[in-house]
């Protein structure tokens, strides 16, 4: 993909990620009636790392094993050692921070391998995170919650946060066999230098986001992006999002999506979507008076599809065209549409009706983007009576039914299969379907859904014939 460079500020820019229980920005407030109090982002679910907005440290997680290797001094909380021969300061490091980039990714992290799930599902594999120190608090986090998987360049890749200590977090990109290909680390988040998630581009490449303080009461965010060789090289491309762009010193960058021609950024605390064509400054998509939130962008070529929340006649989905015009794609005044996802051929989303029924809908994906042609797939069995945590890919929509059950629904006919978690584990959230496998986060049992202990891959074909 083409790699443009913008440096909107000098070396000192970016702030820590604010307190965030759903930094992916995929969830509106818990219920429509709670919108005034709920603000942006989700009020429940697994979300991301929870950053303390004053100190910049993490407020969740737990400890783990002593690392079985490495040299050099240990981190402040006794986590994975920082070996100077393995790590270097990246070219984009802000002056106020001490971000590290792995010179040798294979030596930069504790070893992780795939092991059998021991749950009776053939081919089910779980990531062994036993050597990851984890956060030294009761929640027992080993990995971040905002994990991703993709088929890119004929290879399956995944990205995950790795908890090397309570105040020592890393974002990493892995090959399918769990070999790390790139690792970025912040071993000093107490001063407000935080690591966000790494994501994959629609046309190739990777982005990763970082936050740091500028002055008291002001922070900014740096997004690095590009193909991995360039991203790890001497002069990587990056974008600075700060007050000069947003006119808000307290905003957060909650997630990034990008193609070869367009990047979209979802920001809080007042939820907005920004678009950037790799020239000049990012532009905010205007919010009409009856729209209180715009979030969860999806980049399709040079167009950006996003979610709106506001009055009954404005809540739904819209598209920002390349000329800046905004068109409505879908609105249903008698239901609340949210959780939009796509694969290469279709969109899916959830609708919560005025009568409290949760429905799964789909529409064909077109390029350029056209108005939706909604088709009801099925009514969703949701014990909570609210939106559910879900992922979509390859024609399968997978959602969290309960701690012991992920349900995969085939959108072509609404038929479904259920999958159990690995032995002694519980589900938290599915995040991808790649090459016929469901990818999902796991928690310890007993434990909490806000703490991720591992990742699992479940072959859908091993789950039996789908049921109507």
Image (tube, helix red, strand yellow):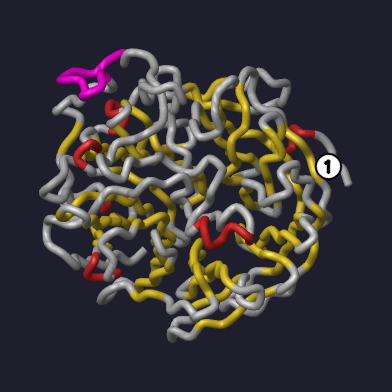
Residue, x 30% and y 69% (percent of image)? 246
Task: Determine the residue positioned at 51% across, 69% down.
Answer: 300
Q: Is residue 141 left or right of residue 371?
A: left
User: Where does the image place residue 37, in percent across and percent down from the top left?
Assistant: 51, 57
Mark 1 closeness class: few <14, some 14–19, many ≥20 residues within 10 Å: some
Region of the chain picked out in magenta, as a range = 68-78
Give the dominant element type of the magenta stretch: helix, strand or loop.
loop
Q: Is residue 452 above or below residue 80?
A: below
The residue closer to the viewer here, 310 or 368, is 310
Figure check: 459 above or below 447: below
Q: Residue 118: x percent and y percent?
A: 66, 18
Which residue is at a point 83% across and 48% down the rendered structure image?
Answer: 415
Q: Give the residue drawn at x 56%, y 30%.
A: 442
Q: Position of residue 215 (x, y in %)?
A: 15, 55
Report if residue 372 lies within the magenta region: no
- Magenta-drawn stretch contains 73: yes
Disc 1: which residue: 466
- Quarter holding the N terminus? bottom left
Residue 207 vs residue 405, the one in the foreground: 405
Q: Nearer the viewer, residue 94 or 251?
A: 251
């Amino acid at each position: 993909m083409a790699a443009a460079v913008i440096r909107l500020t000098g070396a000192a820019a970016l702030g820590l990620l604010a307190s965030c229980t759903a930094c992916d920005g995929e969830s509106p407030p818990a219920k429509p009636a709670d919108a005034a109090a709920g603000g942006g982002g989700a009020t429940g679910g697994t979300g991301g790392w929870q950053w303390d907005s004053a100190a910049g440290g993490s407020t969740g997680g737990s400890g783990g094993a002593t690392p079985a290797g490495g040299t050099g001094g240990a981190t402040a909380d006794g986590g994975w050692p920082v070996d100077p021969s393995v790590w270097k300061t990246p070219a984009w490091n802000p002056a106020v921070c001490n971000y590290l980039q792995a010179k040798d990714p294979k030596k930069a992290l504790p070893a992780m391998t795939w092991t059998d799930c021991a749950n009776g599902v053939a081919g089910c594999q779980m990531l062994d995170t036993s050597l990851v120190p984890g956060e030294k608090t009761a929640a027992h986090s080993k990995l971040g919650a905002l994990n991703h998987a993709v088929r890119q360049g004929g290879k399956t890749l995944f990205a995950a946060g790795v908890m090397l200590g309570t105040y020592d977090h890393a974002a990493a990109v892995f090959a399918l066999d769990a070999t790390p290909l790139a690792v970025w680390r912040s071993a000093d988040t107490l001063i407000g230098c935080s690591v966000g998630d790494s994501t994959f581009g629609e046309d190739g490449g990777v982005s990763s986001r970082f936050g740091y303080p500028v002055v008291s009461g002001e922070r900014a965010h740096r997004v690095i992006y590009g193909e991995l060789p360039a991203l790890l090289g001497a002069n990587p491309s990056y974008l600075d999002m700060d007050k000069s762009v947003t006119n808000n010193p307290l905003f957060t960058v909650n997630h990034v999506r990008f193609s070869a021609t367009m990047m979209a950024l979802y920001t809080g605390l007042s939820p907005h979507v920004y678009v950037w064509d790799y020239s000049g400054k990012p532009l905010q998509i205007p919010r009409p008076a009856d729209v209180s939130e715009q979030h969860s962008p999806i980049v399709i070529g040079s167009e950006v599809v996003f979610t709106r929340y506001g009055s009954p006649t404005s809540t739904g989905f819209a598209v920002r065209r390349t000329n800046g015009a905004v068109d409505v794609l879908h609105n249903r005044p008698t239901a609340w549409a949210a959780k939009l996802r796509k694969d290469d051929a279709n969109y899916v989303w959830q609708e919560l009706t005025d009568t409290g029924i949760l429905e799964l809908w789909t529409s064909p994906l077109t390029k350029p983007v056209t108005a939706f042609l909604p088709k009801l797939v099925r009514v969703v069995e949701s014990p909570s009576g609210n939106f559910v945590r879900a992922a979509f890919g390859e024609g399968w929509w997978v959602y969290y039914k309960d701690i012991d059950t992920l349900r995969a629904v085939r959108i072509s006919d609404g038929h479904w299969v259920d999958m159990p978690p690995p032995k002694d584990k519980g589900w938290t959230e599915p995040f991808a379907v790649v090459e016929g496998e469901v990818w999902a986060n796991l928690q310890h049992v007993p434990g909490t859904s806000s703490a991720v202990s591992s990742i699992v891959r479940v072959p859908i074909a091993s789950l039996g014939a789908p049921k109507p």
